[in-house]
Amino acid sequence: MRPIVGLVALLSVASAVAEPPSSFSSAKKILARDVYQAEDRVTFYCGCSFDEQPVPAKPNRTRLTPAAASCGLQPRKNANRAGRIEWEHVVPAWEFGHQLQCWQEGGRKGCRKDPEFRRMEADLYNLVPAVGELNGDRSNFRFGMIAGEPRAYGACDFEVDFKQRVAEPPEQVRGDIARTYFYMEDRYGLRISRKQRQLFEAWAKTDPVDLPELQRARRIEVIQGYANPFVESKAMQATGH
C-alpha cells in the first residue's frame, strides 16, 4: 500500500465528460480516455503498465496492450488474450445481474433492456483494467483465499482455483475490491453473503485507501456526479479532514 500524501491539495480534476456513461461500451471509452491517465495506466491485479497500440493489419484501430516486462507477467495458457487489456467488473455482471428479474427472463442480453442493469453494468467505480487472460480466468468466480499460493501468471500475484471457483487477488487491491462491493451494495442494493462480508471487512482494514485509489475515485466522481463514500470517507479519516 502506498501512503496517502497531499490529499488536502488534491481537488477535483477536469473532465470532458458531463454525465455518467449510458452503456458498458461508452464506459470503456471514458475509462481509457478520462480516468486512467498516462501515469496511472497500470493493470489492477498485476501492476503492468499499458498503453495504446495499433492493431496489425487494421490501420484505423488501436487496442490497449500490457507491457509484460514491466510486471513479470507470463501467460498461463492464452498468450493472445494475455496481450490485451480488458475492462473487468469487480462485481461480475453475472453476480449483480442474477439479482434482477431481467436476468431470470433473458440473461445478460435480456438485461441490456433494463435501465437499472445498464447503470450497474456501466458504473465506472466497478470497472478496472485487467490483463485479458486474468479477466477470462476469473470469470464470475467469487473472491477468496486459496491455500498454497499457486502461481500461474509469472510474477503476478493472482491465483485462481477453477475447481472451487475462487480467485485470490494481490494484497494491495483487496481493500479496493471490498470498497467496490460495499459501494455496489449501497448504490444498487447488491446482496453480499455474511461470509463474503466478513472477508471484505477484513480486507478493507488491512488495505486502507491510498492515493491512487482516491485519485481514481475523484475522477469518477467528476464524471458520474456522486462519490464512492467508502473511499472518500476513509480517506478523510486517514488525514483528519
Image (cartoon, grey):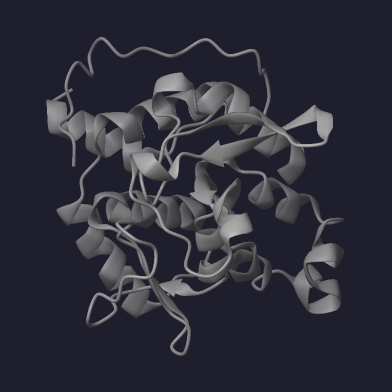
Q: Quadrant of residue 97?
A: bottom right
Instruction: From the top left corner, tell me how far across and down residue 211 is, in percent.
Output: 26, 29
Note whether 20 is above or below 202 in the view shown. Answer: above
Residue 146 point in image, percent of width and height: 29, 79
Residue 43 image position (x, y, % from top left):
44, 43
- Position of residue 237 in the picture relative to residue 183 (left or right): left
Q: Is residue 181 visible?
A: yes
The C terminus lies in quadrant: top left
Q: Which residue is at a point 57% across and 59% down the rendered structure image? A: 79
Q: Is residue 176 left or right of residue 38?
A: left
Q: Residue furthest front?
A: 57
Say above or below: 74 vs 240. Answer: below
Q: Residue at x 18, y 28 (%)?
A: 4
Quadrant of the image occupied by residue 152: bottom left
Quadrant in the picture for the N terminus: top left
Front position in the image: 208 or 29: 29
The residue sitting at 52% across, 27% down in the picture is: 35
Tally of marks: 0
Which quarter of the picture shows residue 195? bottom left
Is residue 23 something one can see in this rendering?
no
Q: Position of residue 173 (x, y in %)?
A: 31, 51
In the rendered structure, the answer to whether residue 202 lies left or right of residue 116 reads left
Q: Is residue 147 shown above or below 35?
A: below
146 vs 237, left or right, is right
